[in-house]
Amino acid sequence: MPTSCLRCVGLRAVFAVVLAAQLCLTVKAQRLPTEASHGIVASASRLASEAGLEILRKGGNAVDASIATGLVLSVTYPRAGNIGGGGFMVIRHVDGLALTIDFREEAPAAAKADMYLDSKGAVIPGRSTHGYLAAGVPGTIAGFALALEKHGSGKVSWADVVEPARRLAAEGFEATPGLVRDLRGSERLLAAFPESRRVYLQNGAIPKVGDKFVQPDLARTLGRMQKDGPREFYEGETARLIAEDMARHGGLITQVDLRAYRAMERPVLRGSYRGYEILTMPPPSSGGIALLQMLAMLEPYDVASLGHNSAAKIHLFAEVMRRAFRDRAEYLGDPDFVFVPTQGLIDPAYARSLMGSFSIEKATPSEGLPAGRPAGLTQTRERPVFDDTGMAESAETTHYSVIDAAGTAVSTTYTLNGLFGNGVTVTDAGFLLNNEMDDFTSKIGEKNMFGLIQGPANAIAPGKRPLSSMTPTIVVKDNKPVLVTGSPGGPTIINTTLLIVTHVIDFGMSLTQAVDAPRFHHQWLPNSIDCEPFLTSRDSQALLEAKGHVLTSRKLYPNDPEAAARSWGDGETVRVDLKTGRLQGANDLRSPDSAAVGY
């Protein structure tokens, strides 16, 4: 063989080796989901995920594991994990039975519609967000107890699911980078309340990464509930501590309010999208209705052909989001207090009719965009006066997802509302309280802390549950849960959930790709598309601006120079891979301490 040919063969061989090495590196660099066969848990805290797994190993089902995970989050993830807040749970059993648990907070009996207004009728800044007056009656423990009683496996007890949290609070755990970052970012809020300063800021000595973080008061509270049962929180020593702390500091929650609180089951909202069944949360969550509306608006369009995060795709999605949030402001509230035309709102034909004003060429002005008129609407509501100035963002709430070996799936989102809630730690009880009263309408046409416009349907009333954006969701195909997902992030929750679902269904992304992909958000007012970094190209941005869109970006911690990331949400997601039958989990890297674990 000629020398030149030998040289050519040698070069080809070298090229093949280099190419193989590059391919190997590419495969290794790609983030793969966690896989398991017996159960999988994804949450914002590795210790909380491991606690759920501990219960699965003991024979518990996904409901049991979800409760253990949620209780540990109150220890390891105090910015949002809670026993002093509330939330929602969507459960789907392996036999197809699906339902929801509503353990949203309630307004105390002494609450009034104008309680956050001054003598001139203006909203008093901070009154609905900071301090004792901002708290609603907590629902988390009641919700967990109801779920365990009616949908647990029966193989583990209430004491079993409380134990991992009690143990971690009593023995302590190493402070994580995420916990230290959160404490530093909220130091001003926590320092304003002596008990929070003592417990979380350690009297001014914020723990360093790796320091042992022990919470003896919280351990005692969990120990009381472990011994005396979940009603101890509402009728025992813990209830007394809450009520006495409230009385000392001008709060409204009493022992009567606590004793009266009950979690409740609600029927799941059902919809479909391209042959997949969507199971999600009904009111007082607005998220489920908005999600089903948006999916119905999208279904007539060939979304995949537009290309992921192209200008055409972002334009279409922003217009869909705009219309769903417009209806949210008009019609949503606590269905036990106001009429919500739920079936009319989620009817696919109605949702698609909202796109009658959609233009491929230009953005629809939010100002003056009318709400739709769904079937079943029996009354004319007062029309609020809106403006579109300003917007706040809080890294509140947390979401976690669980699937067990049998295929039971649980999607849970719960919250303190703002980061570290209202900043108040109950004296001698060791846990933070929520500031959920801000999710009510303090004044018609005024924005809440998330920049959301609220209508009269969501006005404050005793015993009422405030409107929420939480969107715990389960997607089913071939009788298997192909996605169990949700997110924190105020109003961005709804659109984060929409994006994860469509990433998988429309674009065929892997689980990790669907969670990792950059996100964007439109909520009608203000009239802008909020973007994570690297959402799309400059060319696509220019095309969107030419259509009339305004693109903005936000920081989670605007006063923290170390918080450079301008991302939001925490889409802890699990699934059954229909091709292999294996369970998969994807933690969200936006949350530094998150983990998906399985066995």
Image (tube, rainbow, N blue to C red):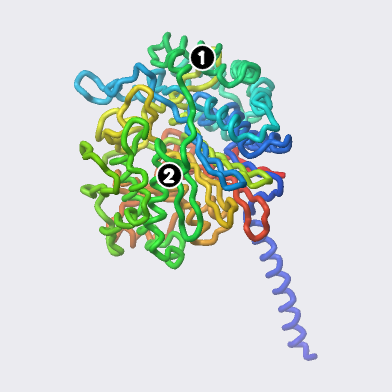
Front in this rendered view, residue 351 or 83: 351
- Label 1: which secondary element: helix
Q: From where the camera sits, is residue 201 visible?
A: no
Name the residue at 53% across, 54% down.
514
594 or 399, which is in the foreground?
399
Q: Nearer the viewer, residue 404 or 368?
A: 404
Quadrant of the rendering where the C terminus is positioned: top right
Image quadrant in which you'd find residue 201? top right
Residue 234, image x and y in percent?
A: 51, 17
| Residue at (56, 29) in percent of width and height | 144
Identify residue for label 2: 288
Q: Quadrant of residue 456?
A: top left
Query: In what quadrant of the picture does the N terminus appear?
Result: bottom right
Callout 1 crowding tier (Cα within 10 Å): few <14, some 14–19, many ≥20? many
Residue 425 in sight in this render? yes
Q: Which mark is residue 402?
A: none
Mark number, residue 239: 1
- Outermost residue toward the left in this view: 120
Q: Is residue 475 found left or right of 257 in the rendered image?
A: right
Q: Could you tell whether 205 is left or right of 357 in the image?
A: right
Alpha-carbon span between mark 1 and mark 2: 32 Å
Three-letter residue code for mark 2: Gly
Q: Residue at x 34, y 47 (%)?
A: 345
In primary-sequence order, the first of circles 1 and 2 is 1
| Circle 1/circle 2 CB separation < 8 Å | no
Horizontal placement of 548 versus 78: left or right? left
Residue 487: % across, % down = 49, 42
| Three-letter code, disc 1 | Ala
